[in-house]
Image: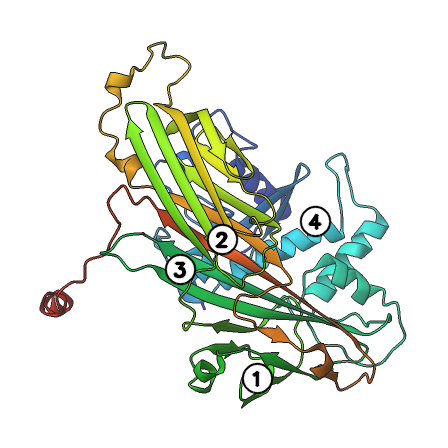
């Protein structure tokens, strides 16, 4: 296929010598043009190993583990191999490179070798042969997980049933189905009359099954109060290819699927939720080298008042912060990594008010290298407008709760191959980019481009 551009695989001695030179184990103190030239594209872990003066092998995937070098030469498409300029090639678009990295990682774990070995034992040679035969029985990688391959080589049971590829090991314990709902909220609060707050609530459902049988079929009922109208229109619920059918009835969705562990069963979004679970107010003022901070958080009524995590982070990028005075109504205030104020609110809001506040005065200064002995005075702290336009990050996590009320009824779970199955449902509600902007600074906004200007831009 390659014609004159074909490069044959060299002998072991020649290949090892060229590989050691390319990775810098040989001729490290001398200039090698093919390795050290400044215009050479860096595409680790793919290397170009020169076989002759004019011909080279690419891509050679090279990994290092415990002092040993593992390498693979994936078979690439003809049009990719013959390209001379590799600067525009993305390794993420080459499936052979990804498979080679995955296979070498599995090889290093399944057949552990040490750098002190001078040769392979007979048992290790057999392990290598079994790994390669099981990992890529027909030349293409089917499974490189060392644990699964070891169970395939030495099966624990004598069952003749064929297992699915995602779970080739038969389950022998009690049958159980574990369902987990993770709901996230992303929020932007500005406390400004000219800028409307924004919020997104979205989630995913995971299902892990440990049931006897080759590929059991599972049915479950997903309940979403007030959110099913979006599902009927096709905009609120997105299911994975593992779901064979879905039925909508009122506020419930009946899903029938064959489980695929470690993969989301479905994703959902709830655009009708517009009220944030926690209202925040953030004010930051700078006067020379002193920063005055005021934060107030208000928990919305009806929200579960129990948190696994509830913190507020105020980053001062490029500055060093030290606390002069702090007065939190609950919790504690400390400095993290030298430039971030962290207010640990605790596990709950006060039961009566559902409100917490923090007032603090901090001393800030620019970071100075240890070699620079000049002290920065307060008069030199000008041009700090960028720090006024900052935000406070609210981080929280709640267990066994969803803001939207989304849940799965354990009694509705039916498994085709097991009449008695233990079903457990867990859920969590977490924040993601939950920001409260400083109301004393300029509100970050995106101006809409006029339609005519946008059309003219697209026509260019």
Left or right, 241 with respect to 78, comes to right
The colouring scheme, among rainbow, by chain, secondary structure or one colour, is: rainbow
Residue 230 quadrant: bottom left
The tag earlier along the polypeptide, 1 or 4, is: 4
Closest to the camera, between mark 3 and mark 2, is 2
Q: Quadrant of residue 415?
A: bottom right
Q: Quadrant of the C terminus?
A: bottom left
Spot occupied by residue 374 in the image (x, y as percentages of width and height): 33, 10
Whether residue 48 appears in this view of the structure is no
The answer to whether marks 1 and 2 mark residues whose Cβ atoms lie closer than 8 Å is no
Q: Which residue is mark 3?
A: 82
Residue 387 location, x and y as percent?
Answer: 30, 35
Distance in Å between CA atoms under marks 3 and 2:
11 Å
Residue for badge 1? 252
Q: Which residue is pictured at 57% across the width and 50% down the height?
A: 10
Relative to 261, say whether 294 is above or below.
Answer: above
């Amino acid at each position: 296929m390659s014609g004159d551009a074909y490069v044959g695989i060299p002998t072991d001695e020649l290949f090892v010598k060229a590989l050691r030179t390319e990775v810098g184990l040989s001729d490290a103190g001398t200039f090698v043009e093919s390795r050290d030239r400044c215009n050479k594209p860096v595409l680790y872990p793919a290397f170009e190993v020169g076989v002759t003066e004019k011909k080279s092998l690419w891509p050679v995937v090279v990994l290092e583990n415990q002092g040993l070098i593992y390498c693979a030469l994936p078979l690439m498409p003809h049009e990719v191999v013959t390209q001379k300029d590799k600067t525009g090639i993305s390794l993420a678009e080459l499936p052979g490179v990804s498979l080679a990295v995955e296979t070498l990682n599995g090889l290093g774990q399944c057949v552990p070798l040490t750098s002190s070995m001078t040769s392979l034992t007979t048992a290790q040679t057999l392990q290598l042969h079994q790994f390669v035969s099981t990992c890529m029985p027909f030349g293409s990688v089917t499974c490189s997980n060392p644990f699964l391959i070891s169970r395939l080589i030495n099966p624990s049971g004598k069952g003749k049933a064929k297992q699915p590829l995602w779970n080739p090991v038969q389950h022998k314990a009690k049958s159980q189905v574990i369902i987990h709902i993770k709901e996230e909220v992303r929020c932007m609060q500005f406390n400004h009359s000219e800028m409307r707050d924004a919020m997104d609530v979205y989630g995913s459902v995971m299902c892990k099954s440990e049931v006897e049988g080759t590929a059991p079929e599972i049915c479950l009922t997903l309940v979403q109060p007030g959110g099913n109208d979006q599902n009927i229109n096709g905009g609120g619920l997105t299911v994975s290819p593992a779901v064979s059918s879905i039925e909508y009835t009122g506020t419930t969705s009946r899903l029938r699927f064959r489980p695929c562990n470690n993969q989301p069963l479905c994703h959902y979004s709830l655009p009708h939720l517009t009220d944030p679970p926690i209202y925040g107010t953030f004010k930051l003022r700078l006067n020379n080298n002193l920063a005055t901070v005021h934060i107030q958080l208000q928990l919305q009524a009806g929200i579960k008042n129990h948190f696994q995590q509830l913190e507020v982070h105020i980053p001062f990028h490029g500055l060093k912060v030290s606390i002069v005075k702090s007065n939190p109504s609950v919790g504690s205030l400390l400095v993290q990594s030298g430039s971030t104020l962290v207010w640990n609110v605790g596990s709950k809001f006060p039961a009566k008010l559902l409100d917490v506040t923090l007032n603090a005065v901090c001393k800030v200064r620019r970071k100075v290298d240890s070699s620079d002995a000049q002290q920065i005075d307060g008069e030199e702290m000008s041009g700090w407008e960028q720090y006024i336009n900052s935000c406070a990050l609210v981080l929280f996590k709640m267990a066994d709760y969803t803001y939207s009320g989304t849940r799965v009824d354990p009694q509705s779970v039916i498994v085709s191959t097991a009449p008695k199955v233990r079903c457990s449902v867990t859920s969590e509600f977490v924040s993601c980019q939950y920001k409260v902007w400083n109301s004393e600074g300029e509100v970050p906004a995106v101006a809409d481009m006029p339609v005519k200007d946008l059309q003219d831009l697209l026509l260019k």
